[in-house]
Image (cartoon, rainbow, N blue to C red):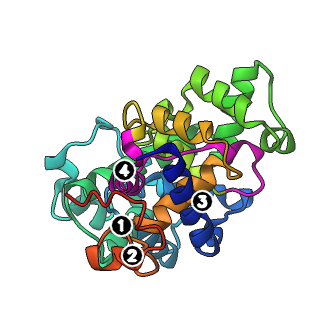
Amino acid sequence: MKTQDAIKIIQYVVDETRPRWKLFDEAWKDVDYNFIWRGYEQGGFAAQNFVKVLNNQGIGSISKIGCILDHYDGDKKYKRDFAGSISSPFYQKMIAGQYGSEGQKFAESIIQFKGNPGGWFWNKLWQMLVCCNHLKNNYEGSYSYYLKAKYAGYKKVQNVTESDFLSLSPEEWEIFKRVKCPWDELYGIGVNVFDFIVGDIVDANFVKDSYKLDSANIHFLKITGIANLLTNLTREDAIRFLKGLNLPYTLREMNKAFYTYCSVTEAEHFGFCRELEKCKLCGINNICEHNFI
C-alpha cells in the first residue's frame, strides 16, 4: 500500500458515504440524552435501541436512571453474580420495587429489550446505572453541566459559559483532555467513547479532531491495507497518519466515513469491506489490498 493509494481510498469512501453520515449530526441541546446511549454503545449492546425502550417507560434521562441507585449503598464495582442477569439478586430486588418505581421500569425495559443479553450487556447496564447516579448526585443530572464544570476546573475559573465552551478549538480540547482525563470519573467511559459522545455535535467547534478507533475503523484500516502504513494500529498513530495526509476533511468526518463504509450496523447501506461478493462492487477495489484473511 502506497500513501497515494491510501489517499484515493479515503477520498472515495468519505465522499461516497457523506449523505449517510451527515444523518448522524447531533445538537448540543441533546447531549444529555445522547450521553446515555452513546456512552454505552459498546460491544454490540445496541444502547440506542435500549434507550428508546427506556423513553417509552418514561425514564430515558440521566436523572431518572440516576435515581435508581439512590436506594443502593453497596459496592459500586460490577459483580456478575449480583447483577449479571435478570434473575440475579439485584434485578429481582429491582422488580420487587426495592429500587423505586424507576427501578421497576428499568427492569421492565430490560425484559422488553430485544438486544443481546450476554455478559457485556449486563456489565454495561451496571456501568450506566452507576455513572448516571454519579452525574445526578454531583453534576445536576447533566452531562453538559459535567463537561463545563470539568473545563472550568481545568481553567481554574468558577464557571464557563456555554458559548465559550462550544467555541473551544480542537487544540485546546485536546490539551484539556490530556491534562484532566475527564473520562476517569465516568464509570465505563474511556477516551474513545468520551470523544464519540460529543463527536457529531454540530454546534461544537472542538469536535473536528475527535476520533474513535472502534472495531469498524480497525476493520477498514486492516482490510484496505492502510493499517500497514501506520507504525502501530493505535488511536494515536491513526490520528497522526490521517492528519498527516492533509486531506480536506476533518478527522471526525473520516472517522464517520470509515464506520459507515464497513461497520456491521451499516452493512445494509454499504458493507463493502464485510463480504467478498460485495467487495467486487466497490469503486476502489482495484487499489484496496482486500485483506479478508
Q: Are marks 3 and 4 in contact (CB under 8 Å)?
A: no
> Which image quadrant is residue 265 in?
bottom left
Disc nearer the start of the sequence (1/2)? 2
Q: Earlier in the sequence, mark 3 or mark 4?
A: 3
The amino acid type, in three-letter code, at marker 3 is Gln
**Viewer-proximal residue among 158 and 251:** 251
The quadrant the C terminus occupies is bottom left
The first of marks 2 and 4 along the sequence is 4
Q: At which x and y percent is residue 175?
A: 66, 25
Marks 2/4: CA–CA distance: 20 Å
The x and y percentages for residue 13 are 54, 64
Mark 2 = which residue? Answer: 267
> 261 or 169, which lies in front?
261
| Dominant secondary structure of the residues highlighted in magenta in the image | helix
The answer for how far apart the CA atoms under marks 3 and 4 are is 15 Å
SS category of the residue bearing label 1: loop
Mark 1 or 2, which is nearer the eye?
A: 1
Q: Which residue is mark 4?
A: 225
Give the magenta-colored segment's residue range: 201-228
Front of the two marks 1 and 4 = 4
| Residue at x-position 25% and y-position 54% | 120
What amino acid is found at the position of numbered circle 2 in the picture? Ala
Tell me the distance, in whole angstroms, between the alpha carbons under discs 3 and 2.
Answer: 20 Å
- Looking at the image, do the residues carrying marks 1 and 4 touch, with CB atoms under 8 Å apart? no
